[in-house]
Image: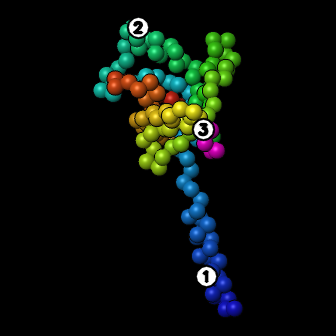
Amino acid sequence: MNKKFVFYLILILAACNAKEEKTPNPIVGKWEYERVERYNGEPINLQDSGFNALHQHHIGLTFFFTKDYVFKVTQRKKDNTEEFVAEQKYELPEEKKILRLKNSGRPDDNFPIIDLTDSLLKINVFNSPVAYVVFRKQ
């Protein structure tokens, strides 16, 4: 066989293998609750009992997303111990606008992703038309 041909064949196969590797899933990692934000940009008034209750409920909440598409939730208690809350499969469609939690025996849960960067996850986990929660990557 021609050495040039073998070289080009190896080069093509290497390029094909590189294309097969998927883009890293940006949601993979540990995310900790940071705050609640309004869609309209107004600051959250924690004197408002509804927003304060929502904020207090989420303090210590941590989401874990694995590369194997497993979603885990823990809640840090006041004594700083972590309590297991839930675990299930998830999907993050290519457009990264919806987080879909895969449920057995009932319809999947779909949560709108407002923004997803290397450090912040803004997601509407309580289906509110007014506000959403912000998680910071740890």
How many residues crowd mark 1 within 10 Å: few (<14), some (14–19), many (20+)?
Answer: few
Instruction: Give the Cα distance between marks 3 and 1.
Output: 41 Å
Task: Identify the residue shown where x is 59% and y is 59%.
Answer: 21
- Looking at the picture, which amino acid does disc 3 mark? Lys
Q: Residue 8 carries which label?
A: 1
Residue 49, numbered label: 2
Count every numbered label the image shows and give the total.
3
Q: Please name the residue shown 37% across and 13% down the image.
A: 45
Nearer the observer, 40 or 87 = 87
Please identify, in this view, whether the residue under mark 3 or under mark 1 is nearer the observer: 3
Above or below, 7 relative to 47: below
State the image coordinates of residue 87 (x, y, percent, origin top left). 63, 31
Residue that badge 3 annotates:
89
- Is 68 covered by the magenta stretch? yes
- Indicate which disc, 3 or 1, sits on the residue closer to the N terminus: 1
Residue segment shown in magenta: 67-71
Q: In this view, does 86 lie above or below 20?
A: above
Considering the numbered disc 3 on the image, is that residue within a helix, a strand or a loop?
A: strand
- The residue mark sitting in front, 2 or 3, is 3
Pointer 3: residues within 10 angstroms few (<14), some, or many (20+)? some
The answer to whether residue 90 is seen in the rendering is yes
Quarter that holds the N terminus = bottom right
Image mark for residue 57:
none
As drawn, 18 above or below 8: above
